[in-house]
Amino acid sequence: MKIAILGAGIVGLTTAYQLTRDGHDVIVVDRQADVSLECSYANGGFIAISQAVPWSSPGVLLRVLTTMFRSDAPILLHPSQLPKIWRWGLEFLSCSSAPISWENTKHILSLALYSLGLLRKVRDEANIDYFQRTNGCLKIYADQHSFEESAKAQEPQIPLGIDFKVLDAAQCIKMVPALDETRQKLAGGIFVPDEEGGDCYEFAKVLSQTIREAGGEFRFSSAIEGVEMEGNRVAKIITSTGSITADRYVLAAGADAPLIMQSHGVRLPIIPVKGYSLTLSRDPWPDAPDLQIVDEKNLFGLNPLGTNRLRLAGLAEIAGYNRAPQRRRTDAFIAGFLDRFPQLEACLDRSNPEPFCCLRPVTPNGLPILGQSRFTNLFYNIGHGHLGWTLAHGTARIVADLIAGKSPALDVTACRPRPTY
């Protein structure tokens, strides 16, 4: 079959890879001039199986409301967005009870572990070097209460496949000596040895070449201007460079997916949530961590990429489709890192730090939306939130199986589109 994939981020590319391996003719369409120039370009770089939990969890609303006017709020909700996201917000609240949040956590974690296995397989098949790190991730905590609560909350995940070690402050410093300078702010940490990371954009570039070698086609600088329907089927995709017809279509357009489908009476429960990242030279800080670090107080991640770069990522901002960084948020972003790692000052050009911002496609329950839509030849692979690269390989294989009429390796009933989608 000929299959058109709408979106050339890591989700669209992994889908294209799986479909070409299945023998399909694939064309990937994107508005950018090359692959993965939006969320996948400079994301945190974490294959974050230990972060595979939904944002909708008990107490999250109170935390958002009590910090939403602070520039350093981990999740900043602009009041102007409330009238636009009220339906999404109500569903978010309904998913935030402990039992529902735990069920969704189990689904996401199962998908993340499945995806990690596929990532390793694809990495070997395509011989991809993307500055990967396979030496685990350390989550650090600033106070004893949050440290103990997180360690307790992690325990139920052990039977699901998560391996972790609880470390005191001294053990964390032994593992990451750079933490010694702020040891008075360190209660302890949780080390996840199976966690991986690397440069998602480098991975995407090599994967796209593999897709081309398998006969896949790319059409860049082609903004999607519309989807033309005939009855309950997609007839063609209208782009800024012409129309595209195919036997099947896969929507993998991230946060733009609701915009593409809204003219057809489809309300996809996805909102854009802006994230921030900075990529710095690590040369001025020779003792920088060689391990992925997640700071649970400030909700940021530090990721060493290769031998000469550091990727800083964090924050979440609900501000509609505004991709521009805010000065006060940038300052708060940097201050959060310096609070933990004062040594990072040497790597920063404080006169003009330029963060990269992208829009994460977030669903109320934290689950991606996968499978056949109410249009018989249109399939969804959308709504991955902050776990795009973490889940991409797994969701790609699942969608490829569903297109082929096969039962996927996991039960994804909870991720299937509703009849109105």
Image (tube, helix red, strand yellow):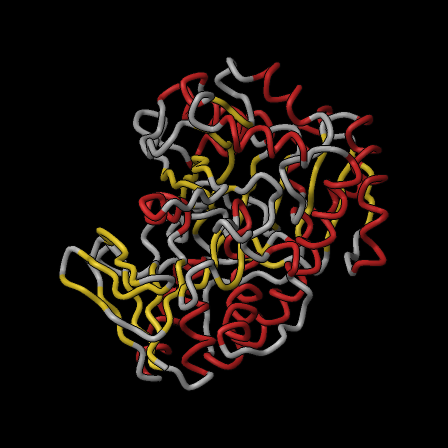
The residue at the far front in this view is 231
Between residues 312 and 79, which one lies in front from this camera angle?
A: 79
Q: Residue 366: x and y, percent?
A: 60, 44
Residue in the picture at 51% in, 53% down: 388
Q: Is residue 391 left or right of residue 101?
A: left
Q: Residue 262: x and y, percent?
A: 35, 43
The residue at the far left in this view is 241
Residue 78 sits in quarter: top left
Q: Residue 358: x and y, percent?
A: 39, 41
Q: Is residue 275 visible?
A: no
Between residues 181 and 168, which one lies in front from this camera angle?
A: 168
Residue in the picture at 61% in, 14% down: 66
Residue in the picture at 82% in, 38% down: 168
Q: Quadrant of the N terminus?
A: bottom left
Q: Where 178 falls versus 203 (above or below)?
A: above
Residue 186 sits in quarter: top right
Q: Is residue 167 visible?
A: yes
Residue in the picture at 56% in, 29% down: 89
Total residue callouts: 0
Q: Where 138 falls versus 145 (above or below)?
A: below
Q: Where 206 falls versus 296 (above or below)?
A: below
Q: Residue 161: x and y, percent?
A: 78, 61
Between residues 290 and 393, which one lies in front from this camera angle?
A: 393
